[in-house]
Image (cartoon, rainbow, N blue to C red):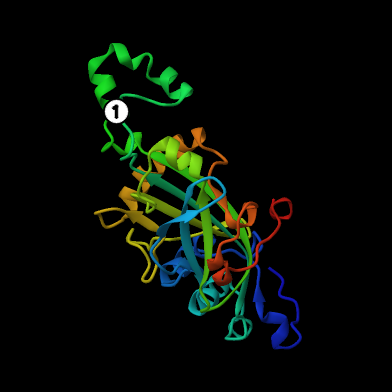
Amino acid sequence: MKIYPILGAVAVSCLSLTPQLGHAQSAPAGEQARMTKPLVIVSRQLDGKSVKGGNGNWHRLEVEVKALPDGIKAALLAQQVPAKYAGDSVKWVNNVKVSVVAGFKPSGSDLSKPKVYQEVLKLKERATDAAAFAAAKDVNNPDNWRYYKASTVVATLEANKPRSVFFYIPGDIVERDGITNPRPDAAYVTLEVDGQEVPVLDEKGAPFTGSNAVLIAGSKPDAAKLAKLKEVAERAVRDTEGVMRPQNLITNFIDADWKASPDFVREEAAK
């Protein structure tokens, strides 16, 4: 990789990783092993809240993200950037994609009495099999939970300055799916910088110190549990694609807590 001359501290004050200048996961094995800080983290546990929207009470998820100075430096050094260009002057990270998948136990619904046309069709074949029908209506089975997914791209993050990104599930969906508790029972956040995923677990399969990218109610997250959650959730969100929305796609109300949010890249420009 060719390093071009850099004129002054301002020229290196912002980090936007290209596919060649990635994070630890694309670094040589020896370099990755020495990295103890990710580039960006979810700095506070995912929070859920019921808010008044255009049609009833919406569920709001708050994802607080933060760029880490040590993570920025480690990511640059892992890509063989000379140390003199990876100093404290690099304070910003651009193009941070935040994706959240959230799963809710449908505690407000009787799954044996589906309310949606398409769900009745799905249960049609199981209704003749007692065991299969019993499994399909068990609200404690994570396979039967309601899962939603949404993404947005943060234009830039300044190191050590956390910013909250909000995601919303509309009131009609909350009522339809019987998800009475606004805090998810399971969730995970994927962070990407310039299209490259930032690790949320260390080499031992545990969350990085200070990272809250994985939420599994009543359980401590690890690599195996995250893999299982992803397997179930990614299959389920195909039925709810586009339902949960990031705050920059909300048009029918304004949330006062947006004052803690970053700026976003327009959806068409982020592709």
Residue 201 occupies which quadrant of the picture?
Answer: bottom left
Q: Nearer the viewer, residue 157 or 207?
A: 157
Image quarter (top left, top right, bottom left or bottom right) of the N terminus: bottom right
Q: Nearer the viewer, residue 243 or 19?
A: 243
Q: Position of residue 234 (x, y in %)?
A: 46, 40
At mark 1, the secondary structure is loop
- Classed neighbour count for the residue bearing mark 1: other residues with Cα under 10 Å, few (<14), some (14–19), many (≥20): some
**What's the residue at 46%, 63% (across, down)?**
29
Q: Is residue 239 above or below residue 253?
A: above
Q: Amino acid at mark 1?
A: Lys
Q: Nearer the viewer, residue 50 or 40?
A: 50
**What's the residue at 53%, 67% (across, down)?**
257
Q: Position of residue 74 (x, y in %)?
A: 51, 75
Q: Relative to residue 7, is residue 201 drawn left or right? A: left
Q: Is residue 9 above or below residue 130?
A: below
Q: Position of residue 46 (x, y in %)?
A: 41, 60
> How many labels were placed on the picture?
1
**What's the residue at 53%, 46% (across, down)?**
244
Q: In the displayed image of the protein, which residue is found farthest to the top?
A: 128
Q: Relative to residue 157, is residue 25 drawn left or right? A: left
Q: Relative to residue 197, is residue 114 drawn left or right? A: left
Residue that carries the numbered disc 1 in the rendered image: 137
Q: Relative to residue 37, is residue 19 drawn left or right? A: right
Q: Position of residue 140 (x, y in %)?
A: 26, 38
Q: Is residue 95 above or below residue 171?
A: below
